Image (spheres, helix red, strand yellow):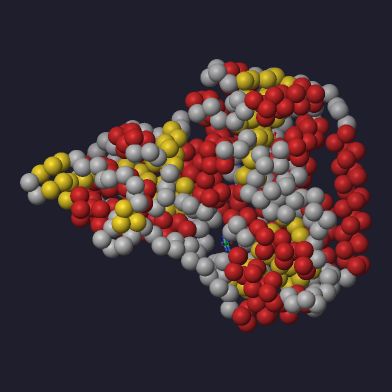
């Protein structure tokens, strides 16, 4: 590394000089942008080329960054979001203007909703033409459109501001509650040149982009006092806790207090799901019965029934919450929070741990015993179901095979989307290590599958198992070409039950069309993979699925297993049927 005049480190490579003039060397916007990214340790960009960023993608590659080029921007954006979640560095997605930008926008909004740090960088048309609405190629006021859908949105008009633009985008994505940031770069910016030395000095290496936020001592004390008096305490771990990478302290806090915990979907594996204190197999019981609940990086949104109602035992007396979160405005968003603890999870959990002292009493044996009893009962019941080998396969029998493979390869990444496929996998497939599970998250969004799988493979270098409903897979299925092109060790298992939720709905109108939820019967998704040189397997039994997964995980070759599932097996909307207006109305 060479030193800069201001003492900051400079990237290894010298700035590319585009011109040698009498006044000295100059540098263009393309290279200022690349150098700004490199200076901030960004080594991978997910995107899709076209005007005005095709050259940028080439130059990024030439300059040593990894460019993962997708078939649709939404999946490049989802990859960037997943990379951000896994690494605590903002994932970068690069798109063309208007339509490319809009394709990336869903991923940006989803990242923001899920608190994943990412930066969507889109080329755009010239301001003069956009602002007068004169009809430029792919004209759109992208900045205005992006603003309400992300944490922050910036535009850079001058080459000398590229350093500031990148620095602001990184800070906005990572600091406080992480989220999505939009950076608008008009085409003209890339070709602008400036004096190379001035350009070099204009770049900023962001120092401490996600500053620790230390919780107030009285907030810690309030939380500990409340916890001390609890008779039936419960910890809920959310994906904020997984993101925070405070794994050792979280585990120590759970184990030292002896409090049972409930992992949210993407927090599974933070402690192994097989941990004796894991209460996942007694979820309904613990949510309803707990008297003090410690939320660590989990919001009381719909996924936790808003912290109220029957799920939370509203009929069983008062429940009190301790909530650890970096966002103060999250507190009281659904129900009163008795003890808010505001700060980053690492600092908050460390402070709580420090305050436990040596004589912390474990929860009453009656509470732990009651949970253990329910867990045993439910796990025994589940084991009996998983042992069955029906023909055709159902969700449980197929997932029992996948469960064993995940157990054998706890370091493998696991991606999951669908309705029944998601709900069953969440409860059947145990996770053993932190940040191994990526799924539909806060929105329950379909289409994250292949983008997340690509990011998981690229970022971690580990094998990836992607378990996909057939409808869910369809949203990003074309990215199997991307997976084959980069030869990624991804094993996709499509749960093919001939439709959305299931394949048996009938069109009652008398017309020839299929019902809206029904797909082509007996489709061969495996052939999509063979079309691009990957391995395709048609699996009709648990043994065939098992064999195909073993081979995929051993070889690391891109593989798609078309797992034939009983088309009558699924429930409409999986476990959230009650959110359908019709179903809800009928119940009333
Ligand atoms: P889940 O869906 O798993 O329940 P949510 O996405 O609802 O989790 O909640 C994650 C929460 O974690 C958000 O409220 C977010 O502000 C918080 N969060 C994310 N990162 C951190 C961090 N490093 N420190 C503290 N809170 C965090
Ligand atoms: N579009 C988007 C972007 N997200 C959604 N969540 C939906 C539509 C609605 N939806 C669900 O909530 S699950 C699902 C859809 C279309 C697919 C369920 O069918 P599947 O899974 O084949 O993927 P199962 O396992 O057969 O239920």
The percent position of residue 116, horizontal first and vertical second, equals: 53, 52
Quarter of the picture for ligand 2? top right
The reply, left or right, for residue 50 in relation to residue 416 is: left
Q: Is residue 106 above or below residue 484?
A: below
Q: Quick check: can you spot residue 338? A: no
Among the 4 quarters of the image, the one containing residue 381 = top right
The percent position of residue 120, horizontal first and vertical second, equals: 41, 47
The reply, left or right, for residue 333 in relation to residue 24 is: right
Q: Is residue 482 above or below residue 88?
A: above
| Residue at the (65%, 35%) spot, across then down | 465
The percent position of residue 142, horizontal first and vertical second, equals: 34, 47
**In this orientation, which residue lies closer to the viewer: 188 or 221?**
221
**In this orientation, which residue lies closer to the viewer: 143 or 549?**
549
Q: Residue furthest bottom?
A: 218
| Residue at the (50%, 37%) spot, across then down | 75
Among the 4 quarters of the image, the one containing residue 407 = top right
| Residue at the (78%, 32%) spot, across then down | 401
């Amino acid at each position: 590394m060479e030193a800069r005049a201001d003492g900051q480190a400079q990237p290894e490579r010298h700035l590319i000089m585009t011109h040698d003039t009498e006044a000295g060397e100059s540098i263009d916007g393309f290279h200022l942008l690349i150098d700004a990214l490199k200076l901030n340790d960004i080594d991978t960009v997910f995107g899709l080329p076209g005007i005005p960023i095709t050259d940028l993608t080439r130059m990024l590659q030439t300059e040593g960054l990894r460019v993962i080029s997708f078939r649709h921007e939404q999946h490049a954006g989802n990859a960037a979001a997943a990379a951000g979640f896994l690494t605590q560095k903002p994932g970068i997605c690069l798109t063309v203007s208007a339509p490319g930008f809009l394709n990336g926008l869903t991923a940006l909004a989803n990242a923001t909703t899920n608190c994943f740090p990412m930066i969507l960088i889109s080329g755009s048309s010239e301001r003069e033409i956009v602002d007068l609405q004169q009809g430029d190629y792919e004209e759109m006021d992208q900045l205005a459109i992006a603003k309400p859908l992300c944490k922050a949105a910036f535009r850079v008009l001058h080459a000398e501001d590229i350093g500031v633009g990148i620095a602001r985008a990184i800070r906005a994505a990572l600091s406080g509650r992480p989220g999505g940031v939009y950076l608008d770069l008009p085409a003209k910016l890339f070709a602008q040149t400036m004096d190379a030395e001035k350009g070099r000095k204009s770049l900023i290496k962001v120092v401490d982009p996600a500053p620790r936020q230390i919780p107030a001592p009285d907030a810690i004390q309030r939380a500990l006092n409340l916890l001390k008096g609890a008779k039936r305490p419960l910890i809920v771990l959310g994906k904020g806790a997984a993101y925070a990478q405070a794994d050792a302290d979280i585990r120590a806090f759970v184990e030292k207090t002896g409090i049972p915990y409930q992992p949210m979907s993407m927090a599974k594996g933070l402690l192994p799901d097989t941990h004796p204190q894991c209460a996942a197999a007694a979820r309904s019981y613990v949510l309803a019965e707990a008297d003090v609940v410690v939320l660590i990086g989990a919001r009381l949104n719909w996924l936790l029934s808003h912290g109220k109602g029957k799920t939370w035992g509203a009929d069983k007396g008062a429940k009190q919450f301790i909530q650890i979160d970096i966002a103060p405005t999250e507190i009281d968003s659904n129900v009163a929070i008795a003890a808010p603890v505001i700060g980053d999870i690492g600092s908050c959990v460390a402070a709580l741990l420090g305050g436990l002292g040596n004589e912390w009493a474990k929860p009453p044996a009656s509470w732990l015993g009651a949970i253990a009893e329910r867990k045993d009962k439910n796990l025994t019941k589940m084991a009996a179901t998983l042992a069955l080998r029906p023909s055709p396969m159902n969700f449980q029998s197929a997932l029992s095979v996948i469960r064993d493979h995940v157990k054998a390869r706890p370091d493998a990444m696991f991606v999951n989307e669908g309705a029944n496929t998601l709900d069953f996998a969440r409860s059947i497939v145990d996770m053993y290590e932190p940040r191994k599970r990526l799924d539909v998250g806060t929105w329950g969004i379909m289409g994250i599958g292949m983008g997340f799988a690509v990011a998981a493979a690229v970022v971690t270098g580990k094998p990836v198992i992607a378990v996909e409903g057939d409808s869910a897979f369809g949203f990003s299925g074309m990215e199997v070409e991307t997976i084959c092109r980069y030869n990624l060790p991804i094993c996709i298992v499509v749960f093919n039950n001939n439709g959305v939720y299931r394949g048996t709905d009938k069109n009652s109108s008398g017309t020839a069309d299929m019902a809206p939820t029904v797909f082509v019967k007996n489709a061969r998704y495996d052939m999509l993979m063979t079309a691009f040189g990957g391995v395709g397997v048609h699996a009709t039994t648990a043994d065939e699925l098992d064999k195909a997964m073993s081979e995929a995980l051993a070889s690391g070759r891109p593989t798609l297993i078309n797992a034939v599932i009983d088309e009558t097996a699924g429930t409409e909307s999986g476990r959230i049927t009650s959110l359908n207006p019709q179903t809800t109305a009928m119940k009333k």
